[in-house]
Image (cartoon, rainbow, N blue to C red):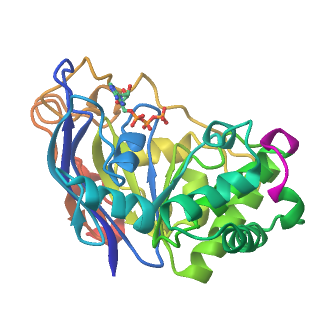
C-alpha cells in the first residue's frame, strides 16, 4: 500500500529565480525504506516537510502530496491535524532541538498522549515506558524521570524516535537522523530505526546527504539536484550502475561505509543556488559529459532506462551495457 505519494510537487517562492522544488514525484509504500539524497540546498528538507503539509511561508504550491490518500496541498486544518497526529511523524537531525530542555523526558512522551489522545496519566506512563524499551533504552522508568541534559545525544535521539511512535503512525520521515551523532552512535540509531521499521511494517523516508549511508539501509533511492529528481532506482542497481553523472559523482565523492578507503573524486563547482536559473540541465555546468547546444538548452525529463528513471539528455549514450 502506498503511504506517501508526491505527484509533480512544485514549490516556488516569489523572490527566487528557480523553484525550490520542481516537479518532484516520489512514493513510499508500507514496509519500504526510501532514501532521498543530494547535496546541501537541493531541496530534501522542503520535500520532507511537505509530507506534514508544512510549506515555506508565501510559497506557491503546485502538484499533490498525499499521505494515505489525503492530499496535503490546500488541505483543511482537520485533515492536516489527522495526518500530523496519527499518520506521519518526523525525526529531525538534532534531538536537543526537538526536546524542551527544562521538562522531563516522561512529559515529552506522555503529553501528546494525554492532551491529544485523552489518555490518563497512568496509562500514558505505561505506554511511554514501553516505547523507551522498544527503542532500546536500558532503564525506561528511570529515563522517564530524567531531564534531557542527563542523556547522551544517541539516547535522546532514541527518545525522539519513541515520541514519533506514540500514535503508531504508518509513515516515518527521518531528516538527517544521524548527522549530529558520532559514527558508532549513528550505526546504533540506524539499527534501531531499521528494526522498528521492519517489526512495524513502517514506510520510512530517509533524508540524507550521504549516499553510502542511504545505500546501506534503503530499498530504493531518489537523487535530487537543484529541486528536481535526477535519478531513481532500487539501491543495488543504483549503486552498481549509476546512470546519471550526478549520482556517479556522489558515489565517487563519498567515503565507503565499509571496506578499504577508496580514492575520492570531488564533484567540481557548486550547486545552483535559488537566485540562479538555467534553461537546460541544472547540473550541466558541473558535468563532464555536458554537450553544448543540447544539455544547456532544455531541462531533461525523467525517462526509464533499465531499472532506473534518469533525467539526463545523454543517459542513453552513457548507459551501461545491460540497458542496451
Ligand atoms: N522557508 C524558506 N524560505 C526561503 N528559502 C527556503 C525556505 N526553506 C528552504 N529554503 C531554501 O530552499 C533550498 C532547499 O532547502 P532544503 O533545506 O530543502 O535543502 P536540503 O537539501 O535539505 O539541504 P540541507 O542538507 O543543507 O538541509 C535552500 O536553498 C534553502 O535555503
In the image, 137: left or right of 30?
A: right
- Span colored in magenta: 144-150
In the image, 21: left or right of 118?
A: left
What residue is shown at x 30% (from left), y 72% (from top)?
A: 68
What residue is shown at x 10% (from left), y 31% (from top)?
A: 297
In the image, 307: left or right of 23?
A: right
Percent position of residue 25, x then y: 24, 57
Q: Is 204 rendered above or below residue 297?
A: below
**Viewer-closest of 56 and 310:** 56
Say whether residue 257 is visible: no
What residue is shown at x 64% (from left), y 65% (from top)?
A: 193
Where does ligand 1 appear, by image quarter? top left
Numbered circles on residues, count? 0
Viewport quadrant of the N terminus: bottom left
What residue is shown at x 58% (from left), y 67% (from top)?
A: 165
Percent position of residue 252, x then y: 54, 44
Residue 93 highlighted magenta (yes or no): no
Say whether residue 116 is visible: yes
Percent position of residue 128, x then y: 71, 67
Viewport quadrant of the C terminus: bottom left
**Dividing the picture into quarters, in which one does residue 34 lie?**
bottom left
**Dividing the picture into quarters, in which one does residue 286 lie?**
top left
**Viewer-closest of 187 and 100:** 100
**Viewer-closest of 7 and 259:** 7
Percent position of residue 37, x then y: 45, 48
Q: Is 41 rendered above or below residue 177?
A: above
In the image, 95: left or right of 242?
A: right
Amino acid at each position: 500500500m502506498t503511504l506517501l505519494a508526491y505527484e509533480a510537487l512544485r514549490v516556488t517562492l516569489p523572490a527566487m529565480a528557480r523553484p525550490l522544488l520542481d516537479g518532484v514525484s516520489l512514493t513510499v509504500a508500507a514496509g519500504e525504506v526510501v532514501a532521498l539524497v543530494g547535496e546541501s540546498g537541493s531541496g530534501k528538507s522542503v520535500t520532507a516537510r511537505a509530507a506534514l503539509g508544512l510549506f515555506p511561508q508565501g510559497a506557491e504550491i503546485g502538484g499533490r502530496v498525499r499521505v494515505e490518500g489525503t492530499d496535503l496541498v490546500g488541505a483543511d486544518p482537520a485533515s492536516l491535524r489527522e495526518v500530523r497526529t496519527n499518520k506521519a511523524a518526523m525525526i529531525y537531525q538534532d534531538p536537543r532541538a526537538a526536546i524542551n530542555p527544562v521538562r522531563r523526558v516522561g512529559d515529552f512522551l506522555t503529553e501528546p498522549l494525554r492532551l491529544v489522545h485523552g489518555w490518563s496519566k497512568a496509562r500514558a506512563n505505561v505506554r511511554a515506558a514501553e516505547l523507551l524499551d522498544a527503542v532500546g533504552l536500558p532503564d525506561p522508568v528511570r529515563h522517564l524521570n530524567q531531564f534531557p541534559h542527563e542523556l547522551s545525544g544517541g539516547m535522546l535521539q532514541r527518545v525522539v524516535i519513541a515520541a514519533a511512535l506514540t500514535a503508531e503512525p504508518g509513515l516515518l520521515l527521518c531528516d538527517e537522523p544521524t548527522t549530529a551523532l558520532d559514527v558508532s552512535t549513528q550505526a546504533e540509531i540506524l539499527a534501531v530505526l531499521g528494526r522498528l521499521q521492519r517489526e512495524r511494517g513502517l514506510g520510512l523516508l530517509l533524508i540524507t546527504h550521504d549516499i553510502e549511508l542511504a545505500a546501506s539501509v534503503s530499498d530504493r533511492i531518489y537523487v535530487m539536484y537543484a529541486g528536481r529528481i535526477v535519478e531513481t532506482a532500487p539501491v543495488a542497481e543504483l549503486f552498481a550502475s549509476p546512470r546519471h553523472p550526478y549520482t556517479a559523482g556522489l558515489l565517487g565523492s563519498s567515503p565507503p561505509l565499509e571496506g578499504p578507503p577508496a580514492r575520492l573524486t570531488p564533484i567540481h563547482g557548486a550547486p545552483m543556488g535559488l537566485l540562479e536559473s538555467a534553461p537546460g540541465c541544472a547540473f550541466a555546468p558541473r558535468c563532464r559529459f555536458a554537450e553544448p547546444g543540447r544539455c544547456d538548452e532544455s531541462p531533461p525529463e525523467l525517462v526509464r532506462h533499465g531499472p532506473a528513471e534518469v533525467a539526463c539528455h545523454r543517459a542513453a549514450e552513457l548507459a551501461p551495457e545491460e540497458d542496451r
